[in-house]
Amino acid sequence: MASATTPQFSFEFFPPKSDSGREKLLTTRDQLAKLAPAYVSVTFGAGGSTREGTERTVADMQVGGLNAAPHLSCIGSSRDEIRALLQRYQAMGVTRLVALRGDMPSGMRDSGDLHYANELVAFIRAETGDQFHIEVAAYPEFHPRAKSAADDLRHFRNKVAAGANAAITQYFYNPDAYYRFLEDCHRLNIEVPIIPGIMPIINYRQLARFSTACGAEIPRWLHWRMAQYDDDPASMKALGHAVVLDLCQRLLAGGAPGLHFYSMNQSAPITALWRDLGLSAAT
């Protein structure tokens, strides 16, 4: 499963909710564009909750010279809505998509015409052929709502069989989970590139809450080491950087086909990792 080609690096952004947030994101865009990522992805709320923001952010990324890959969620959307969105992205010159099932927005009862990510991938292929490079999600520690790890792996195989080109993982801090996942995929003849998702540790308490909700495991040793620095933000920041830097180094040394950084719309943590990984003279 390891890639013999040059690793590719990419970043994820989320649509800002205010004009000031947009200005900050444009600054982040310009700073990270200097690193020449292969592409950037832009998240998408289920049921179209951030649809307009996603499209505008994709356009902002393109203006900044970046290859933008919008996230596309099927939950809460009809085939006609998805078809129209695909047509708009084609008109914008988008060539990559991240196809996801998504979560049902609070208060919404109609789950839409498509219920699983593999159905969305198949629909995109039926509508547009090979016009889009499609990434899907992968879960080395398996999806929190999966019945079992084996069941989650079957869902992943279905997404690949439907036409996905590659996958981006949920973030993790235990590289062994990633390598075990690759071995499991290999046994099922799943051979698409599986790019590790990397979450810089910016706000540990916020990360811990989010990880509980999304099922990403924070190793016990990391939790206890972070707890030592509750009253020392500088030391906590330094430890978080060192932990994620070591993770990235181990993954690249192990043959990972690239790294996908969850930027949280901030440039400093990414440029620091980039610099210390020796990927460029980031400033």
Image (tube, rainbow, N blue to C red):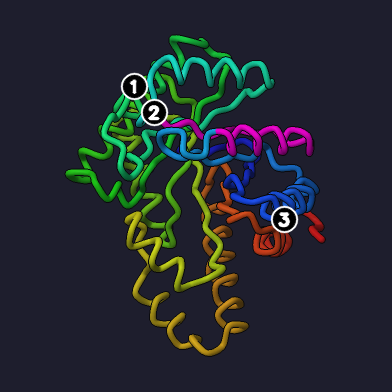
Q: Residues within 10 Å of mark 3 (few under 14, many from 20)?
A: some
> How far is mark 1 from mark 3, CA to CA?
36 Å
Residue 233, horizontal then vertical, whole percent:
58, 83
**In terms of depth relative to the viewer, which is nearer, 3 or 282?**
282
Q: Residues within 10 Å of mark 2 (few under 14, many from 20)?
A: many
The magenta stretch is 52-74
Q: Is residue 28 above or below residue 195?
A: below
Q: Is residue 78 rendered to the left or right of residue 153? A: right
Residue at 34% across, 25% down: 118
Query: Dot 1 corresponds to which residue?
Result: 119
Of pointers 1 and 3, the one earlier in the residue sequence: 3
Secondary structure type for disc 3: helix
Of pointers 1 and 2, the one earlier in the residue sequence: 2
Which amino acid type corresponds to the residue marked 2 in the rendered image? Answer: Cys
Which amino acid type corresponds to the residue marked 1 in the rendered image? Answer: Glu
Residue at 45% across, 73% down: 205
> How far is mark 2 from mark 3, CA to CA?
29 Å
**In terms of depth relative to the viewer, which is nearer, 52 or 119?**
52
Q: Quadrant of the N terminus?
A: top left
Residue at 40% across, 50% down: 178
Which amino acid type corresponds to the residue marked 3 in the rendered image? Answer: Lys
Q: Is residue 261 above or below residue 112?
A: below
Secondary structure type for disc 1: helix
CB atoms at circles 1 and 2 under 8 Å apart? Answer: yes
Image disc number at residue 24: 3
> How far is mark 1 from mark 2, CA to CA?
9 Å
CB atoms at circles 1 and 3 under 8 Å apart? Answer: no
Q: Quadrant of residue 222?
A: bottom left
Q: Is residue 113 magenta?
A: no
Residue 208, horizontal then vertical, whole percent:
40, 68
Query: Dot 2 corresponds to which residue?
Result: 74
